[in-house]
């Protein structure tokens, strides 16, 4: 990746001090200014090459249009809902987040809500503070032996699963992208949502908010759940339809809800917050010292890596795509790629869309094979026997028959025919 010149960065919110320190240690001039009004930001943003925000700064299209020198918007955290990513991409500005800095904190809060729902801990605390000693009202139930449905088996979904298994919960889940064998390796049996709804005693959602996940739990799906199912949303407001949740709580179809996120934050409509079977938090998933420190450090390090021309990590800007047809060795290949932060990346090869853009650098081995659970280990074995180490692995999202996979390798194979028993086709590149 070509180095990018970033000399000055504005940090417009309270971000962990390590962020400033790392940027300054690498020769970047840092200005910290909090609570800037929109007009102030518009007037000043032209002075900076980089902007670091958390969730309070709304980086709107008019701010981006005034940002004549801006090359990077770094979000110390996960969601980039407060940044107009399309406007930034259109202007050639990279938007980056720190996708894994919050994972453990958000997973732990989810577990705390699941445990609180099972034993009414917050309600009992409130009752004690009011001077009561009410042991009957707060009869709970064990988590042991109950079924937890996890919708969205990404970073947080996985951590929730492994933690709740320690309580003896059976974990089932659904994710359109995470392969069945991968989630099975951390103890989650995947199934369709139709199969999942009626099985679960508890359901927790860990997907992004997007058209396909808005109202995943709605009147229709609540009706398919066990009566008294308890639900948790520590992901994004709207994944559980709030009006449907209230109806389900009132009818008893839903036995309780743990909510960290809302359609509108703070919620003006207090019906859910005030419901006796709802326990709620003011979006605290990422609010731990450790998560904030990690996110501050990660975003600074990602900016420094970009300056040094190292890997581009955490870029969320939608790539502008180029599609071409290549003819090599008598075969025709349809490929789509783009350039992300100066790095040429491959997005698709003959209908196989890769889960993560593949940076076109180093030694790359492409092979076409059916993606069974043994594929990676059998490839690793063949490659190791030929002195080659796997450094990265990219699987396709869509699964046409025998899709293309790609591995980054320590060196090229002297002879591709050693792969013959395991793959249908193979090619390698040194870039
Ligand atoms: N409460 C907080 O403060 C807090 C903190 C961190 C993250 N979050 C939110 O938690 C959510 C999960 O974060 P993550 O880091 O695990 O994200 P991730 O990208 O690692 O995982 C999301 C998973 O959802 C899956 N998914 C997409 N569409 C789906 C669908 N229709 N049905 C089922 N699964 C689907 C994806 O395939 C992916 O595996 C995000 O919405 C994120 O914004 C909230």
Image (spheres, helix red, strand yellow):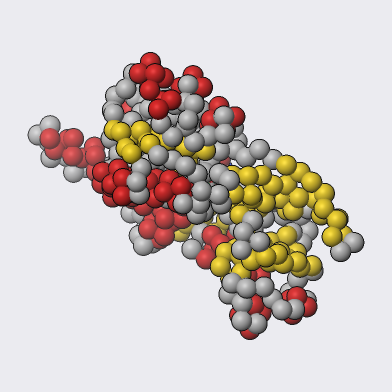
Kindly give the residue lying farthest to the bottom in the view shown.
385
The image quadrant that residue 260 belongs to is top left
In the visual, does 370 lie left or right of 178? right
Direction from residue 171 to residue 44 in the image, left or right: left
* Quadrant housing the C terminus: bottom right
Residue 356 placement (x, y as % from top left): 60, 51
Image side of residue 388 versus residue 81, left or right: right
Q: Residue furthest left?
A: 131
Is residue 250 visible in this depiction of the protein? no
Between 301 and 260, the one nearer to me in the picture = 301
| Position of 331 relative to 287 (above/below) | below
Residue shown at 62% from the left, 73% from the top: 411
Residue at the outermost top position? 39
| On screen, residue 183 above or below 424 | above
Residue shown at 51%/48% (left/top)? 3
Identified at 42% across, 36% down, the residue is: 50
Residue 70 visible to the viewer: yes
């Amino acid at each position: 990746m070509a180095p990018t010149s970033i000399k000055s960065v504005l940090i417009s919110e309270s971000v962990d001090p390590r962020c400033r320190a790392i940027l300054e240690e690498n020769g970047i001039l840092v200005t910290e200014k909090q609570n800037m009004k929109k007009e102030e930001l518009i007037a000043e943003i032209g002075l900076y090459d980089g902007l670091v925000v958390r969730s309070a700064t709304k980086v709107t299209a008019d701010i981006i249009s005034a940002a004549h020198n801006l090359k990077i918007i770094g979000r110390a955290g996960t969601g980039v809902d407060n940044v107009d990513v399309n406007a930034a991409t259109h202007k050639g500005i990279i938007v980056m987040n720190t996708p894994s800095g919050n994972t453990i904190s958000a997973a732990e809060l989810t577990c705390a809500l699941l445990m609180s729902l099972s034993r009414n801990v917050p309600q009992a605390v409130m009752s004690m503070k009011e001077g009561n000693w009410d042991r009957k009202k707060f009869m709970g139930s064990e988590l042991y032996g109950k079924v937890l449905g996890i919708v969205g088996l990404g970073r947080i979904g996985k951590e929730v699963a492994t933690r709740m298994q320690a309580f003896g919960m059976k974990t089932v889940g659904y994710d359109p992208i995470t392969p069945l064998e991968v989630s099975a390796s951390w103890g989650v049996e995947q199934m369709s949502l139709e199969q999942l709804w009626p099985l679960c005693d508890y359901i927790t959602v860990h997907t992004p908010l997007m058209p396909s996940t808005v109202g995943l739990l709605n009147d229709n799906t609540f009706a398919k759940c066990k009566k008294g199912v308890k639900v948790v949303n520590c992901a994004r407001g709207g994944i559980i339809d709030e009006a449907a949740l209230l109806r389900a709580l009132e009818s008893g179809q839903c036995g309780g809800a743990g909510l960290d996120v809302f359609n509108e934050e703070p919620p003006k409509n207090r019906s859910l917050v005030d419901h006796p079977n709802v326990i709620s938090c003011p979006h605290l998933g990422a609010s731990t010292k450790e998560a904030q420190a990690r996110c501050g450090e990660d975003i600074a390090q990602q900016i420094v890596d970009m300056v040094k021309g190292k890997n581009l990590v955490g870029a969320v800007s939608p790539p502008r795509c180029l599609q071409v047809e290549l003819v090599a060795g008598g075969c025709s290949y349809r490929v789509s790629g783009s350039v992300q932060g100066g790095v040429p990346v491959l997005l698709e090869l003959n209908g196989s869309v890769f889960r993560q853009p593949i940076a076109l650098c180093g030694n790359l081995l492409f092979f076409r094979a059916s993606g069974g659970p043994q594929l990676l280990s059998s490839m690793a074995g063949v490659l190791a026997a030929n002195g080659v180490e796997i450094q990265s692995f990219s699987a396709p999202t869509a699964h046409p028959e025998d899709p293309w996979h790609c591995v980054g390798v320590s060196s090229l194979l002297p002879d591709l025919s050693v792969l013959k028993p395991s793959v249908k086709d193979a090619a390698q590149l040194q870039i």
